[in-house]
Amino acid sequence: MRPATGSTPVSRTGLAGPVYYVDTDTHRLVAFYTDSPDFHTTTGIEPGMAQNAADRFVHRTPYGPWNAIGQASPRANLILPSSCRRPGRCGGKVLALMLESKQNPIGLLFT
């Protein structure tokens, strides 16, 4: 992942683990990526979780170019990519949590 101009990746654990992208002008978080099960969504979905369990939590299955569960708010997009290589129910796992600001996107989610 390469940050856009004006944002800097900041990792709390070195090269592995969560990566926080901070806008260098505003010092605000603009994106976040992790494959650590130490983090979870408000619905309880975490990286490494069985995809079918995650599907049940949000009442949908992976779809789209990321083959992922996507959630959006007025300020951010959340993508939960799956190891499944096809839409619908499968035996895969949630690979990561990827969150990006809509107000200051950096291209993490290519939106």
Image (tube, grey):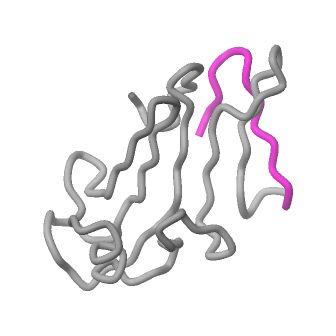
Whether residue 54 is in magenta: the answer is no
Task: Using residue 65 as the reference point, say whether residue 99 is left or right of it.
Answer: right
Residue drawn at x 58%, y 68% as measured from the top left? 40
Q: Is residue 53 or residue 92 the one in the foreground?
A: 53
Residue drawn at x 31%, y 79% as measured from the top left? 92
**Is 44 above or below relative to 18?**
below
Q: Is residue 84 or residue 71 the one in the foreground?
A: 71
Q: Is residue 23 or residue 54 the one in the foreground?
A: 54
Whether residue 7 is in magenta: the answer is yes
Residue drawn at x 52%, y 36% as measured from the top left? 108
Spot occupied by residue 35 in the image (x, y as percentages of width and height): 59, 66
Quarter of the picture holding the C terminus = top left
Residue drawn at x 14%, y 69% as measured from the top left? 88
**Residue range of the region highlighted in magenta in the rendering:** 1-13
Quarter of the picture holding the N terminus = top right
**Is 57 above or below relative to 111?**
below
Task: Using residue 41 as the reference point, say whether residue 87 is left or right of it.
Answer: left
Q: Is residue 14 or residue 60 the one in the foreground?
A: 60
Name the dominant secondary structure of the magenta segment: loop
Spot occupied by residue 105 in the image (x, y as percentages of width and height): 54, 24
Q: Quadrant of residue 103?
A: top right
The number of callouts visible is: 0
Spot occupied by residue 77 in the image (x, y as percentages of width and height): 45, 39
Task: Using residue 28 as the reference point, say whether residue 49 is left or right of it.
Answer: left
